[in-house]
Amino acid sequence: MSVLAAISGNLNAIGYGLAAIGPGIGIGVLVGKALEAIARQPEAAGIVRTNMFLGIAFTEALALIGLVAGFLFV
Amino acid sequence: MIRAWLLAAESTGFEAPSVKEFFPPVALFADSVFRMTRINLIGMLMTLVLVVFFTLAFRRPQFVPRGVQNAGEVALNFVRVNIVEEVMGAKGAPFTGYLTTLFFMVLAFNVTGFVPGLQIAGTSVIAIPLMLALVSWVVFNVSGIKHHGVGHYLKNNLFPAGVPAPIYLLVTPIEFVSTFLLRPMTLTVRLLANMMSGHLLLVLFFSATSYLLFDAAGFLKVFGLAAYAMGFAFTLFEVLVAFLQAYIFTLLTAVYIDGALAESH
């Protein structure tokens, strides 16, 4: 059977691309909710913003692990 | 004449930037343990700039600040009020010194990413983010252990309250990895990846501008202008990212210290 078409390149890039979908959606939802909370109660903006950053740190961790996973799993 | 020189120099096709951007040729003390590249020299330069700025600002402090002292006070107040007091409140006072140093070091090293002439961030190679993340890790763990004692600190972090007993089999390994392994790793990679990708984007856009405008076929020259516009836009974006990444690194360190000192609930 002859090869009709082929893709070459690094699988790490595809891995990271797939890994970035979830955190992208997650961070979008999180920041959207934080914005709604700040709009509803502006005097709570400080504590909402702090917790928003904490949530972003946890969600973004998954995307960053996707970035280095290509190098970890040889 | 300049254009002819450029044409002669770059007629080998487009060279996309790669990771080699972050390993420039050794500038000083080659073949010894002290070898320094451009990136190390930039780090030393920015350390000197920070020391000179803060020394000039607070050399003879007046009660009513003027000039450089005013700028220095605005800078210090930003970290103390917006990061330390907002996250930790009064009990964050002992950590203000470390967090201020951290913030200004990351900011100064990030800023060189778009300063003309320097144009590579000191934090775009892994050594500086890794060192800062490890120091932050030591600070939050040691402050937690000093406040609670080793056993109580581990119990607060690894066995969170309000979880039914069998679920601890699942929660404790996750909490261990998340608190003690992932935190320094994500601090490092977040800062590093942002600075690396920003630098690669800027190099790509500006080298593409040069290539498309001078070396490409006729109708592609228009895309050179588009590449230049993108380079301009992304330089502005890099200004934002430099500041934001410094803020996030410091804010997360403050949150981790606050979490380590907090009573379990």
Image (spheres, coloured by chain):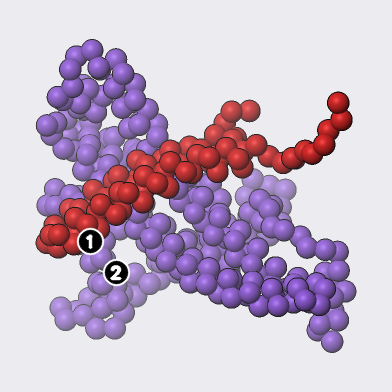
Chain colours: A red, B purple
Do the residues indicated by labels 1 and 2 lie within the same chain of the protein?
yes
Residue located farthest toward the top when viewing the structure as drawn: B166
Q: Earlier in the sequence, mark 1 or mark 2?
A: 2
Between A27 and B63, the one nearer to me in the picture: A27
Left of B127 or right of it: where is B23?
Answer: right
Between B35 and B264, the one nearer to me in the picture: B264
Question: In the picture, which quadrant includes the C terminus of chain B?
Answer: top left
In the rendered structure, which amino acid carries the disc numbered 2? Answer: Ala
In the rendered structure, which amino acid carries the disc numbered 1? Answer: Asn
Q: Secondary structure at mark 2?
A: helix
Percent of width and height locating residue B142: 27, 35
Measuring 15% from the left and 78% from the top, which residue is drawn there? Answer: B63
Percent of width and height locating residue B238: 49, 65
Percent of width and height locating residue B59: 29, 74
Measuring 64% from the left and 45% from the top, which residue is drawn there? Answer: B33
Question: In the picture, which quadrant includes the N terminus of chain B?
Answer: bottom right
Q: Chain of mark 2?
A: B
Measuring 78% from the left and 63% from the top, which residue is drawn there? Answer: B14
Q: Chain of mark 1?
A: B
Asked if residue B186 shows in the view, the reply is no
In the figure, B71 relative to B199: above or below? below
Measuring 86% from the left and 64% from the top, which residue is drawn there? Answer: B12
Left of A18 or right of it: where is B260?
Answer: left
Could you classify mark 1 by the number of other residues whose Cα lies within 10 Å: few (under 14), some (14-19), or many (20 or more)? few
List the residue tagged with mark 1. B82
Could you classify mark 2 by the number of other residues whose Cα lies within 10 Å: few (under 14), some (14-19), or many (20 or more)? some
Q: Nearer the viewer, mark 1 or mark 2?
A: 1
Left of B108 or right of it: where is A56?
Answer: left
